[in-house]
Image: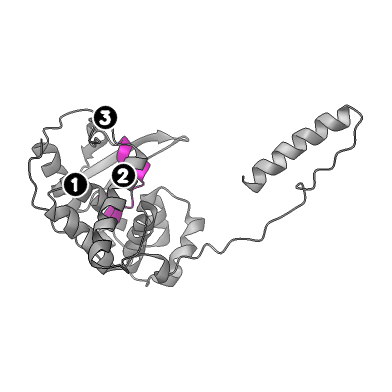
């Protein structure tokens, strides 16, 4: 249970007990946990070879959905939740005819992100192959809308396959791959402000990536990514 929850709960108990004439002290009120070190270091993230292995395995399996999802995380820094919620009406072209995703307003904030060229082409191909013209884009084996746990299971599936030939292959999550996406953008030279805006996070958290990036110049955040994803050999699995 989070400290803030304990503090609020005990304060509620204190007020009720004191109103009833009983003494109760909320010891959590003034208790402060030391700040956790949230700095992200290279050893906490999968390396490029690890990521390449996962992409290769999903490509060779003809699993174009997994390949597409991993690409959206690695190049665009999307969360599992954002990917699962994606619908065709989120996709649009900007004034420069660049493919974008418009995420609806959440907490009074909406954002439009430009997709890199490689991901744009893969997404259009995926939609064409699977004949997805409207509604949600990603579905699980049961034919229902993909859930966050389904996306995590996809990654775990290919990590388990990788471990069969390499016992030392690391475990990592979709969130770890998202951290990699921001690392690649920053390493390519995107500013912390641009990456934060692109990723839908606050700039104050960007200092966590400073140990794993190099500084440089400016463009669209995702265009600075230092990785390039080759299109998979798509198969019509429907």
Query: Nearer the viewer's eye, disc 1 or disc 2?
Result: 2
Residue in the image at 28% along x and 47% along y: 154
Name which quarter of the figure residue 60 lies in.
Answer: bottom left
Asked if residue 231 is among those painted magenta in the image, a careful observer would answer no
Residue in the image at 31% along x and 41% along y: 150
Residue in the image at 34% along x and 57% along y: 177
Can you identify the residue that label 2 sits on? 151
**Could you tell me if the residues under marks 1 and 2 are in contact, i.e. CB atoms within 8 Å?**
no
Q: Is residue 191 left or right of residue 60?
A: right
The residue stretch that appears in magenta: 72-85
Q: Circle 1 sits in a helix, a strand or a loop, which is it?
A: loop
Quadrant into which the C terminus falls: top left
Give the label on residue 144, or none.
Answer: 3
Measuring from the top left, give residue 14's x and y in whole percent.
81, 36
Q: Residues within 10 Å of mark 3 (few under 14, many from 20)?
A: few
Give the label on residue 98, or none.
Answer: 1
């Amino acid at each position: 249970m989070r400290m803030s929850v304990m503090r609020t709960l005990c304060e509620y108990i204190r007020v009720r007990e004191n109103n009833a004439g009983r003494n109760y002290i909320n010891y959590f009120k003034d208790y402060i946990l030391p700040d956790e070190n949230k700095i992200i270091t290279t050893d906490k993230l999968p390396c490029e070879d690890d990521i390449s292995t996962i992409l290769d395995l999903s490509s060779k399996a003809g699993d174009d959905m997994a390949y597409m999802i991993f690409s959206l995380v690695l190049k665009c820094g999307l969360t599992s939740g954002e990917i699962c919620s994606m619908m065709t009406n989120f996709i649009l072209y900007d004034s420069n005819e660049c493919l974008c995703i418009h995420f609806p307003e959440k907490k009074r904030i909406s954002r439009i992100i430009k997709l890199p060229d490689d991901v744009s082409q893969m997404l259009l191909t995926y939609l064409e192959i699977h004949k997805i013209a409207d509604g949600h884009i990603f579905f699980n084996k049961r034919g229902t809308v993909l859930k966050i746990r389904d996306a995590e299971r996809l990654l775990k599936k290919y990590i388990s396959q990788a471990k069969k030939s390499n016992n030392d292959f690391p475990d990592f999550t979709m969130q770890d791959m998202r951290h990699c996406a921001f690392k690649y953008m920053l390493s390519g030279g995107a500013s912390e402000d641009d990456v934060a805006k692109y990723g839908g996070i606050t700039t104050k958290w960007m200092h966590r990536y400073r140990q794993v990036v190099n500084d440089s110049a400016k463009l669209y955040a995702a265009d600075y990514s230092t990785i390039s994803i080759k299109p998979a050999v798509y198969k019509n699995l429907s």
